[in-house]
Amino acid sequence: MTVTAPGRTDRHYLMCEPLHYTVSYEINPWMDATRYTDRDLALRQWRTLRDTYLELGHRVETIDPIEGLPDMVYAANGATVVGGVVYSARFRHPERQPEGPAYQKWFADRGYVTHTAAVINEGEGDILVVGDLILAGTGFRTERAAHGEAQELFGRPVISLELVNPSYYHLDTALAVISSDPASPQIAYYPPAFSAGSRAVLQTLFPDAIIATDADAVALGLNAVSDGENVIVAPGARDLAAALTERGYRPIPVDTSELLKGGGGAKCCTLEIRA
Ligand code: ARG
């Protein structure tokens, strides 16, 4: 078992303030449009998350929220950025489709090279960079063909993983990248969210991975953000926090309970910009 975390590295994040946050449609099992959502609480929780990144010394930029796009707060879905190249998102549900071009424009306006996706993919919700590899989810949102598109664009091997539990509809709800250091890549994941074949692939690639418990998964604890040392994690994911501590990481509980009503947590609110 790897007992030492590789150490913190500087990160650059893009976030979107939940100014227009609400649950007005249902596209995943966590969403209930009849339930009351407290936008001010969502805003406070989001600001705490942003401030936590800033206190850790990371750079945070923001994209202006657009009225009528309540899920835009989940910035991770907006694109995938590797080596300064932007693979745009193309959303499955019509309710979220305008978000893809909005995020792509944010990057294009700042001089990034952007690639317009030919295939449905929901950004870092389903496409995660771990060391030299990319892990990519399919089953509910992102098409398997998008994995090939990402591999061709980024020139990195993309490993396809099949999600089977609708509550864990994006890869980042079932698997967290704990260390992206190519010398010591590390993940945490919840095996029941994956098909048998995908579980076997994960076991082969990451034999020392942290295995999340049912309680971690239900708290959306896998929707965590790590800088190689500090790991922002939902407070309810106690087993995951203990496992991280045991391996030399520093779990930092940040409550995003109000944003969980839309089916997202810390990672969903955070798009990493990799130079
Ligand atoms: N309501 C959003 C949806 O269902 C939540 C997205 C969460 N984001 C994520 N990266 N998993 O699309």
Image (spheres, grey):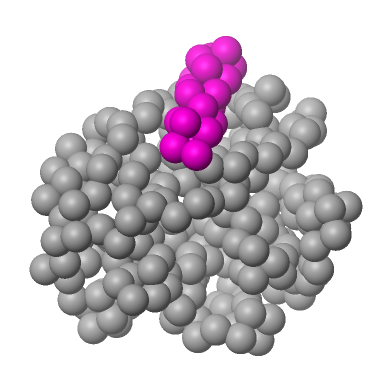
Query: Quadrant of residue 256 in the image?
Result: top left
Q: Specify the segment rendered in magenta.
A: 33-57
Left or right: 16 in relation to 2: right
Q: Is residue 237 visible?
A: yes
Asked whether residue 171 is drawn in magenta, I would say no
**Residue at image coords 60%, 62%:** 274
The N terminus, quarter of image: bottom left
- Residue drawn where x is 64% and y is 71% of the image: 83
Q: Is residue 204 above or below residue 218?
A: below
Q: Looking at the image, is 44 positioned above or below residue 171?
A: above
Q: Percent position (x, y) of residue 138?
A: 49, 70
Return the residue nearer the eye: 163 or 17: 17
Q: Main secondary structure of the magenta part?
A: helix
Residue 236, compared with residue 136, is above or below; it is: above
Residue 2 figure quarter: bottom left
**Count of numbered tags:** 0
Q: Residue at x 16, y 55 (%)?
A: 247
Write down the quadrant of residue 181 in the picture.
bottom left
User: Does residue 192 appear anywhere in the picture?
Assistant: no
The answer to if 43 sits in the magenta stretch is yes
Q: Residue furthest right?
A: 109
Instruction: Estimate the x, y position of residue 275 in percent, counting from the top left.
Output: 64, 64
Nearer to me, 51 or 92? 51
> Is 52 situated left or right of 60 in this image?
left
Q: Please give the name of the residue rendered at 23% of the width and 83% of the height, measured from the top-left corner.
A: 204
**Residue 56 in picture, x, y percent from top left:** 44, 37
Residue 201 versus residue 188: which sits nearer the camera? 188
Residue 200 or residue 158, whichever sits in front? 158
- Residue 65 position in % (x across, y down): 75, 32
